[in-house]
Amino acid sequence: MEYAYEQADGKPAVYKDNKRYLYLITPLANYAVPFVAMYGYIAHGQNLLWILTIPIYVYLFIPALDWLLGEDRFNPPDEVVPALSSDNYYRFAAWASIPFFYAIYIAGMWFVMTQSMPLWAQVVFVLGIGLINGNANTIGHELGHKTNKLDQIGSQLALISIGNGHFAAEHNLHHHIKVSTPEDCSSSRMGENLYAFALRDMPGAIRGAWSIETKRLAKAGKNTLSLHNRLLVSWGASVAIALALALWLGWAVLPFILLYKFQAVFVLTLANYVEHYGLLRKKLDNGRYEPCAPRHSWNTNHIFSNLSTIHLQRHSDHHANPMRPYQALRNFEDLPELPSGYPGCFGLAHFPPLWFKVMDPRVMAWAKGDITKVNIDPRKKAALYQKYGAENESFA
């Protein structure tokens, strides 16, 4: 597909999106990994090494591929953005992921319930498919930012597969308003480790979404405990699928379903943790925060993981321009940059001392050495102020 346009000097030009089909192919390649693991285990005499396929792929192979392929800092010309944004192929590429979330979920539960393996292997495999299907958050996120009814339904279909139906409402109506402020439960603070953040982010998202939905229903004169409640409908659909699987595979599958869903939702918490760590919007004299700019989100242009997440990692432009579709998201100069793509950063975040060692200096460089301009965990404020000082010239 080529897009004809007129350059600033009046000369005609043609733009071709070289990533067009990769937005479809790369996520689908990721979705194949659980099936490769299942086939390998069965075909090779129940060799337990195949159970490790998914975590090795996500936490070792993808970061290595990101390192080898490098970064893509190219932006589409401004003149073609309207045509690029309205091209329905990119919507199709996002929708194409949805059946795979259900296929992985259902096949994965069948696999752990019908194949002979130790409990640790069952747990590792279920965590693995939850890790892969964490991309349902990405697809639900992209479609959830659309205003048309069909894409809103697509967003919920993706999120139902992992039991995270409350995400879209909380993300759009709370997170985007409060992002990179102490008031946002989904913006991590400097000095706050991943696990402490999860205890704030995961329940906070549910409370926020429930508050939004009850207010919406009250305004419309509808009963909260009714089919008009979108959260109850979404959660109910997730429970119905789980019960159907239990009737088919036995009630012993339910703990694995809960573990799968927890892991898939925890992937969203991992993303939230790395996307805004320590970044702070300035509070103005009128009590409001400055508008969200690209500099208030961590960015990364690593090629493979960015294609896998349909440009979610160009998060800086997304928060500054939330209605811009993924294929048109831009890179900017002088953005706060993560050291790797999301999978590499997720792995790093699991080990707080390593995460702090790598990221805290980056936060201080972003703040030009002024720790008063950083979103800090209140429990770590004294220690961080002592370490970095009010204005540390070494980071300026």
Image (cartoon, rainbow, N blue to C red):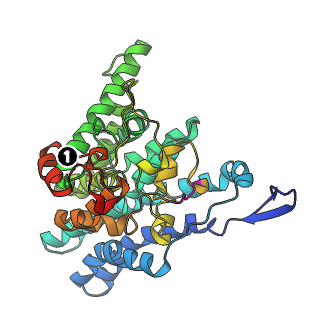
Res 56 quadrant in image: bottom left
| Residue 266 on image: x %, y % | 27, 53
Residue denoted by label 1: 377
| Residue 94 on image: x %, y % | 54, 55
Q: Secondary structure at mark 1?
A: loop
| Residue 385 on image: x %, y % | 17, 50
Neighbor class of circle 1 (other Cα within 10 Å; few <14, some 14-19, many 20+) is some
Please tell me which residue is depicted at 12% across the width and 45% down the height of the picture: 379
Please tell me which residue is depicted at 12% across the width and 47% down the height of the picture: 382
Can you name the residue that lies furthest to the top here? 221
Looking at the picture, which amino acid does disc 1 mark?
Asp
Quadrant of the image containing the C terminus: bottom left
Q: 232 above or below 249?
A: above
Please tell me which residue is depicted at 33% across the width and 47% down the height of the picture: 241
User: Horizontally, is 224 left or right of 380 in the view?
Assistant: right
Q: 132 above or below 44?
A: above
Can you name the residue that lies furthest to the right here? 11
Q: Main secondary structure of the magenta part?
A: loop
Q: Is residue 332 magenta?
A: yes
User: Horizontally, is 365 left or right of 115 in the view?
Assistant: right
Q: Nearer the viewer, residue 324 or 90?
A: 324
Q: Nearer the viewer, residue 225 or 215?
A: 215
Q: Is residue 251 visible?
A: no
Q: Is residue 238 visible?
A: yes
Q: Nearer the viewer, residue 12 or 170?
A: 12
User: Horizontally, is 219 left or right of 15 in the view?
Assistant: left
Magenta region: which residues? 329-333
| Residue 272 on image: x %, y % | 33, 51
